[in-house]
Structures are given as C-alpha cells and as structure tokens.
Image (spheres, rainbow, N blue to C red):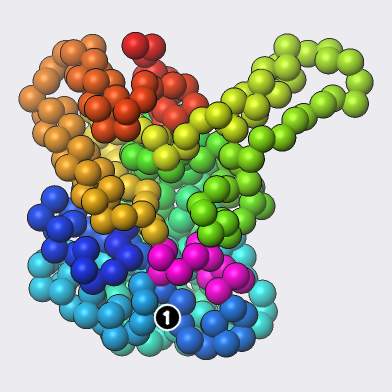
Amino acid sequence: MKIISPIDNLAELDSLLQAGADEFYGGYVPDQWRQQFSLLTSINQRTFATAQIDGHDELLEIVSRVHAAGKKISLTLNAPFYSDAQLPVIVDFVDAMAAAGIDGIILADLALLRSLRRRHADIELHASTLAHIGNSLAAATYLEAGIDRMVFPRHIPVAEMAAVTEKFPAVAFDAFLLVGKCPNTEGLCTFHHSSPDKIWPCEIPYRIEPVDELSSQRLAGAIAKQKSWSVTNRRHGCGLCAIPHLGQAGINGLKLVGRGAPAAQKVSNIRLARDFMALAETEPDFDTYRKKAITAHRERFGSPCSPNICYFPEFYMAE
C-alpha cells in the first residue's frame, strides 16, 4: 500500500519525502477563479489560504521536484458540484495543469469527470471521498463515467470496502488512515470548511431536541452521538488498527488528512503510518499489533482512543 500525503508548499516537500511519502495531493486556486468567484467559493473544499499552494510558479516547481523523486502528485477539485459558470474555468485550469505535468485530479462532480475524461486520456482521475462511493452501484456509476481510481468515504467499514474492491479488481481504491475524522457522511454534508481558526461547524456545540417525546432508543443514541462531537478532537482520527485488514481488502493507498496543517504534523503522520505498515508485515498476532497501535495513538496525540475518532470502529478496543 502507498502512503498518500497532503502538500501545501515547496518548503515541506523534502521532509515529506524523507519521512516516506509515496504520493502527494494538494490544492491550488487559479487566478481566474479568485477573480470571478473568490477563495470563499471553494474550488477544492478548503477556503483558507494555508491549505492552498501559493502561486503558479511554486506549483510548477513542486510538480517538477515530485517527479524528480519518482513520485506522483494530484490536485484536488473535489467540490460535490460546480455551476455552469464555474465548469469552463475549471476545465481550462486542468488543461493548463495537464501541460504542466500534473498526474491526477481528485474530483466528485460527474459532469466535470465526463468533461475531463474526454479531454485528458493520460491524467488519472480519482473519485474523491465527496463522491460518496458507498457501494458497488456508486462505484459502477463513476467507472462508467471514466474514473480511474476511487477514495472510499470515511464512514465505510473495511468489510464493505473489500466487497467493492473485489467486484472491481482493475480499479485502485484508497482509504483514509490518520487525522481529520469526519463526524458526517461527507458526500451528503453541506457544512463549509471556512473558519479561519479551523473550527468546523460539526464541532460547535448545539442541541437537538425532538418535536415529540423521545420514542426510540435509536433516536436517543443519535442525539447523544451528535452531542459528543462538540467535546471530541476530530484531529485525533486514527485507523492504525485496521492496516492489516485494509491490505487484505485490496486497498491501494492509505490517505493522510492534513491540508493546511504544519509540516511537522504531516511528517509525524507519515512516519506513524510507515511504522505500522511495517509492523503489519512482521506481527502475525492481531491483538498484539492492536495494542501497539493503541499505545502509539496515545503517544502521538496525547489522548486515548475513542469510538468517535476511530476510523474503523469495527476494530475498536477500549484501553
């Protein structure tokens, strides 16, 4: 499996490569988009500047140096959909990026996918987690439209991933592994990542009250679950325990969250993922492996595991 790391600037590239990143992804906002739609109208699900590569020349240099290291880099254009006015701007932008040598585009909008597939046979097109590939029918829809690679949403159990990868053996599938656990079903979420202090709406405390008297334990559980997110640090998201099972499920790449995060955090996440990929190859006893993963999580984040921040709660074990 590959380790797929975010990258936000040229200065952090060498440290990410040395830590063991196999592949990169990042965001960039072209000048035409800024002039017509502004940064707040997200082209790639981030509206703060630190999550964007700063300038066309820097982007070209990153692409050149990533290629010199024998690696690949993809750009995120993964809003769930774009307007009729926005699509031509994005298509022109991808044309320019193709000329610059970009390896892949991560997207969700089916109209954009179809347009790019007709224009760029050599660019690898990835279905983003925002595409909501939750089952084999969704995967088939994107495959028919021309997708090359798919990223599973962050709420899909490993067994369901395995069922999809088995049905489409020619397609590469990626799964998230570390930090940024999302409390929502991303492809259906309308919250906007626009807070300058990085506090997302899903973390703001609010109360759900049923119109009528609580009549179901399921509803009561859902209300309690929602309330718990306001006291959960979603940046401690972790899927280390699942690495052996992800490999068996046919996952191609382990994707690390962190666009806009400091380089030191990205490096720590890459090293942690690399260490446990190696351990998964040498430790045959899963209980022993899992205990080491739980210990490593506490050391990395300074807090215990919890069901909220566990990417794959089917493997969760209380400390």
Kindly identify the residue that appears in the image at 51 percent across and 80 percent down: 90
Is residue 242 visible to us here? no
Q: Pick whichever, 162 or 303, lies toward us.
A: 303
Please tell me in which quadrant of the rendered image residue 118 appears.
Answer: bottom left
Please tell me in which quadrant of the rendered image residue 311 appears.
Answer: top left
Measuring from the top left, give residue 53's x and y in whole percent. Answer: 36, 72
Q: Which residue is mark 1?
A: 94
Per the image, is 239 magenta?
A: no
Asked if residue 302 is positioned above or below residue 50 in the image, the reply reads above
Q: Is residue 112 left or right of residue 73?
A: right
- Magenta segment boundaries in residue numbering: 39-52
Q: Is residue 298 left or right of residue 193?
A: left
Kindly identify the residue that appears in the image at 39 percent across and 35 percent down: 236
Kindly identify the residue that appears in the image at 48 percent across and 43 percent down: 153
Is residue 94 visible to us here? yes
Kindly identify the residue that appears in the image at 23 percent across and 75 percent down: 63
**Type of the residue with mark 1:** Val
Give the structural element (helix, strand or loop) at label 1: helix
Q: Pick whichever, 142 or 83, lies toward us.
A: 83
In the picture, the quarter occupied by the N terminus is: top left
Q: Is residue 220 left or right of residue 48?
A: right
Measuring from the top left, give residue 48's x and y in whole percent. Answer: 49, 65
Measuring from the top left, give residue 190's x and y in whole percent. Answer: 66, 52
Asked if residue 125 is positioned above or below residue 21 in the image, the reply reads below
List the single residue furthest toward the front: 197
Please tell me in which quadrant of the rendered image residue 104 appears.
Answer: bottom left
In the picture, the quarter occupied by the C terminus is: top left
Q: Pick whichever, 68 or 139, lies toward us.
A: 68
